[in-house]
Amino acid sequence: MRNFAYARATSLKQAIAATADGAAVIAGGTELLNWMRLGIADADRIVDIGQLAELRGITATSEVIRIGALATLNEIGESELVRTGAPVLAQACLKAASPQLRNLATIGGNVLQRTRCPYFRAEAATTAALPWPCNKRAPGSGCAAKDSAFSRLALFGWTDECVATHPSDPAVALAALDATVHVVSAAGSRDSPMTDLLLTQEEAATQSATAGTARRGNCAAIENSLRRGELIVACSVPVTATSRNSAYIKVRERESYEYAMVSAAAGVALEGARIRTVCLALGSVAQKPWRVTAAEVSLRGQPLEASALDRALESALATARPVRGNEFKVLLARNAARRALLVAGGAL
Ligand code: SF4
């Protein structure tokens, strides 16, 4: 690990100035330190924003829950405001990582974590020392995962450059709930829908082509739409009938502590025995939470029954493009989504 300079920000203004100057941001420390240890990041300056009180706290009105970027996953998961207004988010937070990590990991850092693809997470001091190709680490080198036995790969939005998925659980719930992410920078502040914060590989390639920076393999490193110097300060979750009746289902290889093979975040508002509105997002099937909008539309007016749900989900998931060896994830995704919808609607 190389030497780096460390500074603790005592105001948001200081943090913004340091970030604009190219300093890497640390808060909980559960991601950046891993990147530095593995050789993924080689920051020479770090600004610690963990003491900024204005980025903490969870508050709510009858219409919206505002969550500071430094709220930890355990704080969100145990918050009565979140548990009643948006249970899917509380559940997603408590199903992420281990209790110890959840005490440190912040919501702002969690949604910006990077893929768990093992080829990307290999320890290598330099990209030249990486023992296999990985376009995210070494642009243009190739993708070792695509033809490997590793099956936790994307179903949607991937390109030949990269087939990795995004591992965050809370991000899936925030996308399903139409949350807004608030960011600041030296240029001012702006809001981004959670659904636009993270990018699929296809979206990253399109943006690079539009900007005239496309080069074989170099889009793989692009994972979100944050601009240089931007800092997440909070996110807002609308409280609706759908958010109040919501649930998160996570399918993983061991229950105690593991990233999702597939997950589903769903909310259901009923009118009598029929569905008025649903929201649905899948996790670990793309490099961003994957909103299943076709199913959301076709389920309106349908009964909340397994057969109706399966019809809508199978039709919506027909656009999946499994990578060799992960075809089984399509069925897992359908089953997870069906279960999430049934639990959210009180039918399970
Ligand atoms: Fe994994 Fe993407 Fe690297 Fe391929 S390019 S090895 S999918 S991170």
Image (cartoon, rainbow, N blue to C red):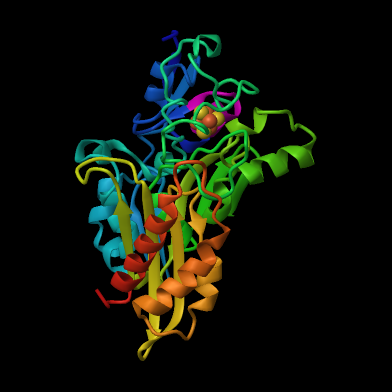
Residue 121 in the image, given as x and y percentages of width and height: 42, 25
Screen quadrant of the N terminus? top left
Residue at the (38%, 23%) spot, across then down: 33
Q: Which residues are magenta?
A: 14-24
Residue at image point 50% right, 44% down? 154
Above or below residue 26? Residue 202 is: below
Q: Is residue 346 a member of the stretch shown in magenta?
A: no
Residue located 28% across and 57% down the image:
91
Give residue 184's quadrant in the image: top right
Q: Nearer the viewer, residue 158 or 198?
A: 158
The answer to which of 199 and 159 lies nearer the viewer is 159
Q: Position of residue 340 (x, y in %)?
A: 34, 66
User: In this view of the protein, can residue 226 be seen by the observer?
Assistant: yes
| Along the line of sight, the residue nearer the viewer: 190 or 141 | 141
User: How many numbered circles does the render carry?
Assistant: 0
Magenta stretch: includes residue 18: yes
